[in-house]
Image (cartoon, grey):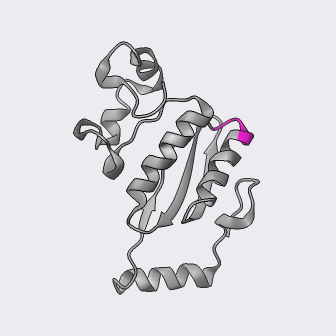
Amino acid sequence: MRILCAVPLCFLMTETELAAINHLKSRSVLKLLECFPNFSEGRRRDVIDAIVAEACSRNVRVLDVEFDADHNRPVLTFVGAPDAVGLAREFAKQYASRFNVPVFLYEEAAARPDRRNLADVRKGEFEGLRDEIGKKPDRSPDFGE
């Protein structure tokens, strides 16, 4: 087990729990959806801890949290029931509101077909996207400003 963030132990999973989940997934008895959203905040520990705490308050199991200050991007890995798309959208809306940041949905949670591919969302990198928000309607975030 790895502890990568100073958040309550809700994201720790024992080897036994992980083995049981893998066994059930392989037998198609339990359907889980794995999510690994990226956030553009890898330096402020309080923000990263708040992201993890919010995820822990939902009906999901946080498996891992990694963050990289050099690239300013933490990755949160969690699993949940197949309704995770709705959860992702709800989380994105609340996160954007709480931290006053733009949030773009992609892949299965995408609100628009042109945002299904993460590479399309990231086109122009962070700086290019930042400059286009509010100027190009197709670059408007799904939540936040």
Residue 83 falls left or right of residue 7: left
Residue occupying the point 76% across, 54% down: 6
Name the side, left or right, on which 140 lies relative to 44. Answer: left
Q: Magenta segment, which residues?
A: 42-46
Residue 72, visible in the rendered structure: no
Whether 136 is drawn above or below 120: the answer is above
> How far across and down, in percent of the image, does residue 126 sit?
47, 26
Q: Quadrant of residue 123?
A: top left
- Residue 24 percent across, percent down from the top left: 43, 85
Q: Residue at x 49, y 40 (%)?
A: 93
Location of residue 18 with respect to 52 vertically, above or below: below
Q: How many marks?
A: 0
Give residue 22's position: percent from left, percent from top: 46, 80
Give above or below for 93 relative to 52: above
Q: Is residue 36 left or right of residue 53?
A: left
Q: Is residue 121 above or below residue 127?
A: below
In the rendered image, residue 43 lying in the magenta stretch gets the answer yes
Q: Is residue 41 magenta?
A: no
- Most prominent secondary structure in the magenta stretch? loop
Q: Residue furthest left?
A: 113
Is residue 137 visible in the rendered image? The answer is yes
Quarter the N terminus occupies = bottom right
Q: Residue at x 39, y 34 (%)?
A: 142
